[in-house]
Image (tube, rainbow, N blue to C red):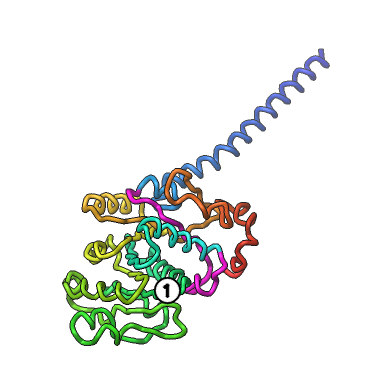
Amino acid sequence: NILDKARIMSVTNGKEKSRTRLIYFLIGLLIPALFIILREYLNNTIRDTKDIEKYSTFPLIGTVKHTNSTDPLLTASRPRSSFTEMFRVIRTRIEFVVQRRVKIAILITSAESGDGKTYVSTNTASVYAMTGLKTLLVDMDIRKPSVNSRLNLTQKKGVTNYLIGECELEDIIIKKEENVFDILLAGTIPPNPGELIRSDKLKEMFVKLREMYDYIIVDSSPIGLVADAYSLAPLMDVNLFVVKSGKTNKAFFKKLNAMLKNDKIKNMYTVLNDVDIETATYSRNNYGYGYGYGYGYGTGKKAGNQYFHYYDDDREI
C-alpha cells in the first residue's frame, strides 16, 4: 500500500509539473503575442508598403531606405550604394510613367514638415544629374525654404525675387563646379506666398526653365499644410508624395489622400521614405514591389546581405 501510494503521488506530481510547465510555456507565448498585438494596435503611423497599399489612393513608385548618414547628397557621394539604386529605380519608373527620358519636371511634396521631401528632392536631382544631362533643383517651398541651408548656400535671391521683378532668371540660377546640378533657390520669404505661386509669371518661369533644362526637380511646400503644391502640380509631369516611415500619421495620410483624389490631382505617386529594410515588410501586389527588393537590399537582413557585393558603398552608410 505504501508503494502504491508513493507511485500515485509520483504520477500526480509528474502531471502537476507537466501542467505547470505547459502553463508557463503558454504564458511565455501569450505575453509576446499580446505585446505585438498591442504595439500594432497603438501604432498610428505609416511604416511599410502594406500600409501604403491600405491607406493610399496613389501608386507607390519607390522606397528610400534609412541610413545613418547626414550627407544631403548621399547619392552623389555613394553612387554604388543600394540607397542610390533606390533613387535610380524611382527615376526609371518615372520614365515609364511619362513615356520619355528627357524634358521631365517633377514636383516633390509631403503631408507635413519633417517627412524628408527636401532630402528626397536633392538626391533625386543628383541621380538625374548623373545622366550627364542638364538638371535643375528649384526650391519652391517659399514659406519655409531649406535647400540653401541643406547645401550650405549663402545666396539670398531666388524665385520670389525674380517674380517681383528684382532680377533676371539667369542671374539667380546657381551654377558652381562643385554642384552636380544647377540650383534655383526660393529667395526672400514674401508676405504673399500664395499669390506669387498662383501668378502667371511663375507659369512663364517654368516654361523658360523647360527650354533650358532636361530635368527639373521642384521641392514644394507640404501639401497637407498649405495649398502651394496645388497650384504647382498641374505644371509638372509627375508629382511625388513623400511619406516617412514611422512618422506620417495614418489617419491624416488617409484623409489627405481622399482629399487629393476628390480634387483630381493628376500624376501623383507615393514615395516611402526612411524605411528600415531589416524590419520592413513589402507587399507583392503594389506598384512599389519589384526590382529592388531581393536584389541587393531585400526585405530583411539576410536578403540584404545576400547580394551585398553588388553595392560597394553600403558599408559607409
Q: Is residue 285 left or right of residue 221?
A: right
Q: Is residue 247 visible?
A: no
Q: Quadrant of residue 190?
A: bottom left
Measuring 42% from the left and 85% from the top, which residue is drawn there?
Answer: 176
Q: Quadrant of residue 119?
A: bottom left
On screen, residue 295 above or below 7? below
The region drawn magenta spans: 56-81
Q: Is residue 155 visible?
A: yes
Measuring 16% from the left and 72% from the top, which residue is drawn there?
Answer: 200
On screen, residue 285 above or below 235? above
Give whichever of 87, 145 is nearer the camera.
87
Q: What residue is disc 1 on?
A: 133
State the image coordinates of residue 212 (x, y, percent, origin top left).
32, 77
State the image coordinates of residue 179 (x, y, percent, origin top left).
44, 81
State the image coordinates of residue 93 (x, y, percent, origin top left).
42, 57
Element at label 1: loop
